[in-house]
Image: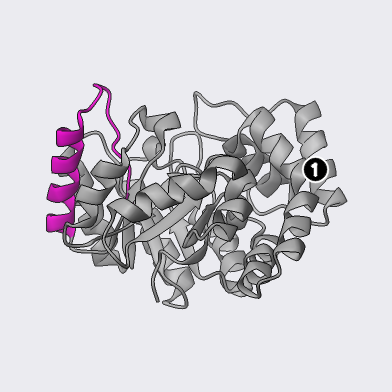
């Protein structure tokens, strides 16, 4: 089972004000994904606030997740860190706990060059020796991968996939074509940005790295299944029904919205890690109304 195909659901990582992970709440969130039979689970992605957790808490989260998932689907673990040696240690922790693959973003304070990013990925891949997905998230890392750099990385052992932000429907086919033209055969090209993902999958994307899929897997799987059956019209209609959720994501950020949704559903009682603040109560009421309107519970 590849962790880089189909729907990959990314849950939040509930934690207290001191950054200690609430493993029971995390297990509840993961149970929804296991019961929905998502193809793969993404732990400690951006939605999972990996950047706000120390190594010990990340390890606790991975161990809890491995225990809950129990090998029923692949577990992909985010290991982004400022230092290469720390990313290696996080990758080794994930590997030793039983992760099926790792997700690595080029986290940095000082802007990185392409050669520095290449060396970072080469070092981590060689040390961790797990299937690795390149995490292209310029909104948080302020580094944009060129197709040429993704191509160079695809030729390294263990680097098997890229998670790229899907552009608009008008641009996504060309975006995927450029990446496919630069990378090795069999390299997985998957997309994030939930409100563009349906178009990206229709254009030939291998995976949907989904924020909504980390809490509402059933509805997202319906879209993936419709596309797999060749029913593009049904997939587009299902995607359109989720537009109120996509609107909330773009207005308030998907991370903040997912915390509010998980709390409304009684799956956690966590706030985002400071300095991120919970959304104001009137906005939380709006989010709850959308969850009820779309029957997402």
| 31 magenta-colored | no
Where's the N terminus, which quadrant?
bottom left
What residue would you read off at disc 1?
288
Counting labels gives 1
Query: What's the residue at 29%, 51% (across, down)?
Result: 182
| 115 magenta-colored | yes
Q: Please tell me whether residue 254 is drawn above or below residue 184 in the rendered image.
A: above
Query: What's the residue at 63%, 49% (across, down)?
Result: 268
> Which x, y percent locates residue 85?
14, 42
Residue 45 seen in render: no
Residue 195 seen in render: yes
Please name whichever residue, 143 or 151, is drawn nearer the observer in this view of the structure: 151
Please name whichever residue, 9 or 242, is drawn nearer the observer in this view of the structure: 242
Where's the C terminus, which quadrant?
bottom right
292 with respect to 14 (left or right):
right
> Which x, y percent locates residue 75?
41, 65
Q: Write down the region rendered in magenta.
A: 103-128
Q: Quadrant of residue 5?
A: bottom left
164 with respect to 265 (left or right):
left
Please name whichever residue, 133 or 74, is drawn nearer the observer in this view of the structure: 133
Neighbour tally class for label 1: few under 14, some 14-19, many 20 plus, Cα within 10 Å? many
Report helix, strand or loop for mark 1. helix
Query: What's the residue at 51%, 60% (across, down)?
Result: 204
């Amino acid at each position: 089972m590849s962790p880089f195909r189909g729907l990959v659901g990314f849950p939040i990582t509930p934690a207290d004000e001191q950054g200690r992970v609430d493993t029971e709440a995390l297990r509840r969130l993961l149970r929804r994904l296991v019961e929905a039979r998502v193809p793969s689970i993404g732990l400690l992605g951006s939605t999972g606030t990996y950047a706000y957790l120390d190594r010990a808490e990340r390890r606790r989260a991975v161990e809890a997740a491995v225990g809950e998932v129990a090998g029923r689907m692949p577990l992909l673990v985010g290991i982004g860190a400022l230092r290469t040696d720390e990313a290696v240690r996080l990758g080794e922790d994930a590997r030793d706990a039983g992760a099926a693959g790792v997700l690595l973003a080029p986290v940095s304070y000082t802007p990185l060059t392409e050669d520095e990013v290449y060396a970072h990925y080469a070092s981590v891949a060689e040390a961790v020796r797990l299937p690795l997905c390149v995490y292209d998230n310029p909104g948080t890392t302020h580094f944009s991968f060129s197709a040429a750099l993704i191509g160079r990385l695809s030729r390294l052992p263990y680097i098997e996939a890229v998670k790229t932000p899907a552009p608009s429907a008008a641009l996504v086919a060309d975006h995927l074509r450029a990446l496919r033209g630069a990378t090795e055969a069999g390299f997985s090209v998957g997309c994030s940005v939930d409100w563009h993902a349906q178009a990206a999958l229709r254009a030939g994307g291998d995976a949907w790295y989904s924020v909504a899929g980390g809490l509402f897997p059933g509805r997202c799987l319906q879209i993936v299944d419709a596309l797999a059956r060749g029913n593009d019209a049904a997939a587009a209609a299902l995607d359109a029904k989720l537009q109120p959720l996509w609107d909330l994501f773009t207005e308030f950020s998907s991370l903040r919205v997912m915390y509010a949704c998980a709390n409304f559903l009684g799956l956690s009682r966590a706030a985002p890690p400071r300095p991120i603040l919970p959304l104001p109560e009137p906005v939380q009421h709006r989010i709850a109304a959308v969850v009820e309107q779309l029957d997402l519970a």
